[in-house]
Amino acid sequence: MSERVDNLTKWLASELKIDNPQIVAITNDASFRRYFRIIIDDVPHIVMDAPPSKEDCRPFLNIAERLKTIGLNVPHIIASDLDQGFLLLTDLGSELYLPALNEQRVDQLYGNALEALAHMQVHANSDDLPLYDRQLLHKEMNLFIDWLLDKHLNLTLSDTERKDLENCLDLLSDCALSQPQVFVHRDYHSRNLMICNSKSPGILDFQDAVKGPITYDLVSLLKDCYITWSKDQITTWASQHYTRLQQNGLLNNVDEKDFLRWFHWMGVQRHLKASGIFARLYHRDGKSGYLKDIPRTINYIVNITAEYPELAALHKLSKAINT
C-alpha cells in the first residue's frame, strides 16, 4: 500500500469514523488525481486523492458548488481534507458516455448533454473565474509546438514556418476573444459525462473552469478527441445549439454562419492544445495510452484548416505531420 493510500485509509477511519474502509481503485485521471470507490452503509461513494504538491482541491469545491446551485448533476462534497488533498464525494455511477455512444443512442445522449451545456452557459456564475485570455490561449497552443512538434516529432521549423504558424495562432486567439464570454467547463466531453438515472448527465472534471469563448465547450463535446462523427452531423448539432443559445439571449445579432466559423476555429485551438497534451502525457508522465488519440485530433485540424485560406500554413503543417 502506498503512503498516499495509507493516509487516505487513515483519514476515512479516524476523521470520518468509517470502520475498516475498503477502497477500490477506479481509472486514473490524466492529471495527478486518482479516484477510488468505497462502500459506506451499502451506498457507493467516491474518494478523490489529489496530492497538494501537484493539485489544488479548492477550485473543484468552488466549481462544484456553482454547478450544484443551478441544478446540474455534479458530485456533492461530503467531506474534505484540503491539507492532505482528500475529498469524499457522492458517486455518479460507472457508465461513461464514451462507450455508450453509438448511432442508436447518440442523439439522445448528446441532446441531454447539449441541454445541460446551454443551462450551464446561461446560468452558471462565471464571476471571479480565471479568464481565457490571449496569454492562456497561446500557452495552450504552444503545447503543440513544444511537446508534439519539438519533443515528440523532433521537428524543427524554419524561421518562416514558425512566423507563419504564429500568425495562424494569433488569428485563432482573435476569433476566440471576439466571442461572447461565458462559463467554460473546459473539458466537456464523453470521458467526463456520465449516464445517470436523471435526464441530465453527470458532469465531472470541472475544476479548471474559466470564463471564455461561448463555443469552447461545444467543440469539446462535438469534436471529441476520443470519438468522431460526420461533418454533417456535427454541423447539425452545432446549429441546434446556436438556436438554443439565441433563444436564451446569448447570441443576439450573431449570424449562424459567424457562429459556425467561431466553432470551427475554436476547435483548431483546442485540438492544437490537446495534441500537445497527449504528447506531454507520454514524454513527461509516462502515459502512452493517449498517443493513439493524436492522429484523430490532428485530423480535425487538417480538415478544418483546409476550408480557410487564412489558416493555410497550419493546414500544410498539420497535414504533413498526419501522414
Image: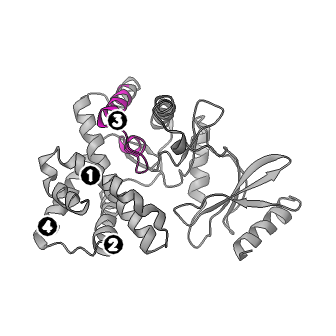
Query: Quick check: is 67 in the magenta stretch?
Result: no
The residue singled out by tag 4 in the image is 161
Q: Secondary structure at mark 4?
A: helix
The residue singled out by tag 3 in the image is 234
The residue singled out by tag 1 in the image is 301
Q: Is residue 157 above or below residue 91?
A: below
Answer with mark 4 or mark 2, whichever residue precedes in sequence: 2
Q: Residues within 10 Å of mark 3 (few under 14, many from 20)?
A: some
* Corner quadrant of residue 161: bottom left
Q: Name the spot of residue 31 as percent of width and height, x first.
A: 53, 64
Residue type at the position of mark 2: His
The residue singled out by tag 2 in the image is 152
Task: Give the magenta part as a residue range.
Answer: 214-243
Query: Residue drawn at (28%, 69%), measured in percent from left and top?
Result: 149
Q: Name the spot of residue 40 as percent of width and height, x first.
A: 83, 51
Query: Residue drawn at (26%, 46%), measured in percent from left and top?
Result: 265
* Corner quadrant of residue 136: bottom left
Q: Secondary structure at mark 1?
A: helix
Residue type at the position of mark 3: Ile
**Left or right of 151, for residue 57:** right
